[in-house]
Amino acid sequence: MSLSVLQAAPRVLLVTGGHNYDNSFHSLFDDTVDVKSNPKAFDTDMRRNYDVLVLYDMATDLTDKQKTNLMNFAEAGKGILIMHHAICSYNDWAWYRELVGGVYLLKSSTYKHDVDMDVKVVAKHAVTAGLHDMKIHDETYHGMWISPDSKVLLRTDNPLSDGPLAWISAYSKSRVVYVQLGHGKEAHRDAGYRQLIKNALAWCAGS
Ligand SMILES: [Zn+2]
């Protein structure tokens, strides 16, 4: 007698809070995704209940216990998709910038809304599978620190941007991808962007 084992869908926790966003953001995910707000999302040990953490939150600090829960999740070999303004969080927490592979410095980095930019696929990777060079209407960030060890997947030559728009972090204990794009509905509804996030979620889940 043989048992057929169905591959369970990845259990995803999406963390929001601390920054406004368009409701169109939620159309990127299906209704199995749990949504919690920063900082309460980090009150419990996330390892038992989730396979993938999606960060679309922004905050300056966490309690030591909340930090430990986030670190334990990352060190457990899970997947973490860090999106857009979540790179602005915890400017003073060195561990977090290593996790992300970059940081938007609240004191010196700059942003610009409503920029039309060319996006180039610059690396072959599961996260860029099926993606082509494209144009997108979105927000640029400039003056960030980006780890030289990050593997850049998407890039723009728009001078309002630092250039890298998505990368794989060098953080080695989990699969960590950062996507700078994704401010508003123009990005959230963009077919190429939707493919990018779908790929990133699948890669984070280890599939
Ligand atoms: Zn934004």
Image (cartoon, rainbow, N blue to C red):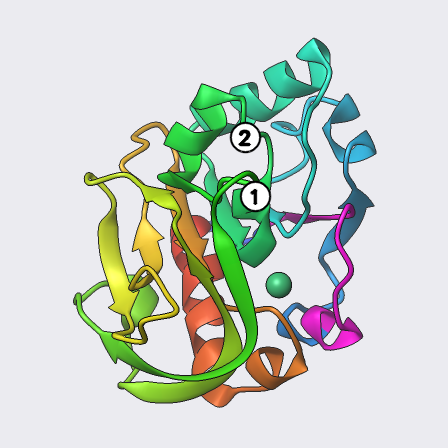
Residue 177 position, x and y percent, is 40, 50
Residue 145 position, x and y percent, is 35, 41
Q: Residue furthest top?
A: 64
Q: Is residue 52 visible?
A: no
Residue for badge 2: 91
Query: Foreground residue, 1 or 107?
Result: 107
**34 lies left or right of 103:** right
* Residue interval drawn in magenta: 11-26
Specify whether residue 23 is painted magenta: yes
Residue type indicated by callout 1: Cys
Q: Quadrant of residue 152?
A: bottom left
Query: Foreground residue, 10 or 52?
Result: 52
Q: Which mark is residue 88?
A: 1
- 27 vs 19: above or below: below
Q: Residues within 10 Å of mark 1 (few under 14, many from 20)?
A: some
- 112 vs 58: above or below: below
Specify whether residue 42 is painted magenta: no
Q: Quadrant of residue 38?
A: top right
For the point 67% across and 43% down, which residue is it?
Answer: 58
For the point 72% across and 28% down, which residue is it?
Answer: 42
Report the label total.
Answer: 2
**184 lies left or right of 114:** right
Answer whether labels 1 and 2 touch (C-beta < 8 Å).
yes
Residue 75 position, x and y percent, is 44, 22
Secondary structure type for disc 1:
helix
For the point 63% across and 19% down, which residue is it?
Answer: 67
